[in-house]
């Protein structure tokens, strides 16, 4: 394990809120839906936190594998997508 990984691990221990916020923003980050300022702040955190960066890489790998091995894309109807977002917003413990 490199020194950067060790410092990143301890950084997550001492600043867990920042890493939690990173995980909450992952979907929007990977989908390119974050505003520029938030994206910049997230990327700055990822540059100093190998643990979160590994998490992002794993997340992207899962998405790629799912797209590659899943059935043909079927778009989610906008109304269902909105209901899912509202449900998630009303249940923050699921984030």
Image (cartoon, helix red, strand yellow):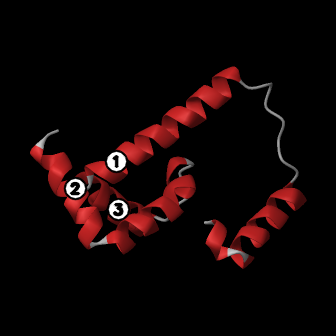
Looking at the rendered structure, the secondary structure element under dot 3 is helix
The front one of 53 and 29 is 53
Distance Cα–Cα, label 3 vs label 2: 19 Å
**58 left or right of 46 in image:** right
Few, some or many residues within 10 Å of mark 1 (<14, 14–19, 20+): some
Are the two marked residues, 3 and 2, in contact with CB atoms closer than 8 angstroms? Answer: no
* Quadrant of res 67: top right
Residue 6 position within the rendered picture, expressed as x and y whole percent measured from the top left: 17, 51
Residues at marks 2 and 1, CA–CA distance in whole angstroms = 10 Å
Circle 2 residue: 8
Q: Nearer the viewer, mark 2 or mark 1?
A: 2
Q: Which image quarter is the N terminus in?
A: top left
Q: Earlier in the sequence, mark 3 or mark 2?
A: 2
The mark closer to the camera, 3 or 2, is: 2
Identity of the residue drawn at 59% across and 27% down = 65
x, y percentage for residue 2? 13, 40
Q: Count the marks.
A: 3
Disc 3: CA contacts within 10 A as few (<14), some (14-19) or many (>=20) = few
* Mark drawn on residue 29: none
Quadrant containing the C terminus in the rendered view: bottom right
Measured as percent of width and height from the top left, residue 90 is found at 73, 78
Q: Secondary structure at mark 1?
A: helix
* Mark toward the start of the polypeptide (1 vs 3): 3
Check disc 2: other Cα within 10 Å, few if <14, some if 14-19, many if 20+.
many
Q: Which mark is residue 53?
A: 1
Name the secondary structure under disc 2.
Answer: helix
Of labels 2 and 1, earlier in sequence is 2
Say above or below: 58 vs 47.
Answer: above
Q: Are marks 2 and 1 in contact (CB under 8 Å)?
A: yes
Please name which of the two marks, 1 or 3, marks the residue nearer to the observer: 1
Label 3 belongs to which residue? 40
């Amino acid at each position: 394990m490199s020194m950067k990984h060790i410092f990143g691990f301890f950084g997550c221990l001492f600043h867990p809120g920042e890493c939690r916020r990173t995980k909450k923003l992952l979907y929007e980050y990977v989908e390119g839906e974050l505003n520029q300022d938030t994206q910049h702040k997230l990327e700055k955190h990822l540059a100093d936190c190998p643990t979160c960066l590994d998490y992002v890489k794993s997340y992207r790998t899962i998405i790629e594998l799912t797209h590659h091995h899943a059935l043909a894309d079927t778009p989610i109807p906008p109304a269902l997508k909105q209901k899912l977002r509202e449900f998630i917003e009303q249940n923050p413990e699921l984030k």
